């Protein structure tokens, strides 16, 4: 693999985030197109690369805050026998350069002249609710990567969850978090449009793929009328986010719980002491 081929491999991986020697699940290999290698050629170049060439590829990706991970057929369900699955993931120990911008997210979710803070709130709420559908309702932990094939949801379900979330916020009145009140300004088909844009972002990133349900999607050609399945790449990225980016929230929650228990123990001790004094 020379430098030109390495650049073509990286360009492919940046576009699709994954490549598979023999795609599973009936998916066809991505064909070559102008300025881009085919999926078969990308896998062949990586497979046939020498250790020095692979090290150069790793260094090249590390400079962009990324790492390439390879998985064999026995690692996770859905990888065909004899195949190999390559996944391009952000390296949690490295920073990504400024060229990786959030602009596509803001542009996709924008309906009017919302601030970035408001758009970020919409994305966060939809991301959390999507994970409720992919994980919580299946009693599945973020570390349960191998169960990604059973994780499906309909776009309409995400719309309904978002509506319920907004109704809950409305019921809180002035007690609703100030940062979330801006979401209550939605009107008309805002929720459906944002859900459609959010799902399309996940599909473009390789984190979801369409799994049409004949009854649920009959006559529907839009994102909210389809059934979506998490991809292996999506499950791997969610696991990584859980370990490296959400872990501090769990630690904070545990710390608060432990602090509450210590306060309760101290309170009970004070009561016991008071009762002994009274006696």
Image: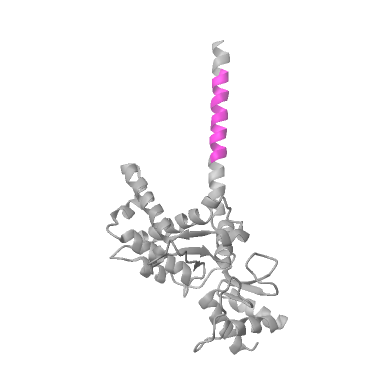
Q: Is residue 12 visible?
A: yes
Say if the magenta span includes residue 136: no
Say if 153 sits above or below 258 in the image.
below
Residue furthest out toward the top:
279
Say if 74 sits above or below 270 in the image.
below
> Which quarter of the figure has residue 54?
bottom right
Q: Nearer the viewer, residue 263 or 129?
A: 129
Q: Nearer the viewer, residue 113 or 238?
A: 238
Say if 124 sits above or below 277 in the image.
below
Say if the magenta span includes residue 267: yes
Residue displayed at 39% across by 54% down? 160
Residue displayed at 32% across by 46% down? 170
Q: Nearer the viewer, residue 107 or 32?
A: 32
Say if 262 sits above or below 240 in the image.
above
Magenta-highlighted residues: 257-273
User: Quick check: 89 left or right of 81?
Assistant: left
- On the image, the x and y values in percent for residue 177 come to 37, 47
- On the image, the x and y values in percent for residue 64 come to 55, 74
Residue furthest out toward the right:
51
- On the image, the x and y values in percent for residue 215 come to 44, 62
Residue displayed at 54% across by 47% down? 252
User: Quick check: 217 left or right of 137?
Assistant: left
Q: Is residue 49 visible?
A: no
What kind of secondary structure does the magenta stretch mostly adopt? Answer: helix
């Amino acid at each position: 693999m020379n430098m030109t081929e390495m650049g073509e491999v990286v360009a492919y991986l940046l576009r699709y985030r994954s490549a598979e020697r023999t795609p599973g699940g009936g998916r066809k290999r991505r064909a070559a197109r102008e300025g881009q290698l085919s999926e078969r050629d990308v896998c062949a170049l990586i497979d046939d690369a020498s250790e020095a060439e692979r090290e150069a590829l790793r260094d090249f990706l590390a400079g962009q805050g990324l790492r390439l991970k390879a998985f064999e057929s026995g690692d996770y369900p859905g990888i065909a026998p004899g195949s190999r699955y390559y996944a391009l993931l952000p390296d949690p120990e490295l920073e990504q350069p400024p060229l990786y911008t959030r602009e596509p997210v803001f542009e996709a979710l924008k309906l009017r002249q919302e601030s970035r803070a408001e758009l970020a709130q919409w994305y966060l709420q939809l991301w959390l609710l999507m994970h409720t559908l992919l994980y919580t309702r299946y009693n599945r932990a973020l570390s349960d990567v191998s169960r990604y094939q059973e994780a499906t949801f309909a776009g309409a379900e995400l719309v309904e969850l978002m509506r319920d979330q907004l109704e809950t916020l409305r019921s809180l009145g002035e007690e609703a978090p100030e940062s979330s009140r801006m979401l209550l300004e939605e009107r008309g088909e805002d929720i459906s449009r944002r859900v459609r844009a959010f799902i399309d972002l996940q599909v473009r990133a390789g984190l979801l793929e369409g799994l049409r349900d004949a009854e649920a999607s009959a006559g529907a050609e839009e994102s909210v009328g389809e059934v979506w399945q998490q991809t292996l790449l999506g499950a791997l990225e969610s696991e990584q986010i859980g370990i490296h980016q959400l872990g501090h929230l769990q630690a904070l929650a545990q710390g608060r719980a432990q602090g509450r228990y210590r306060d309760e123990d101290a309170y009970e001790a004070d009561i016991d002491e008071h009762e002994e004094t009274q006696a």
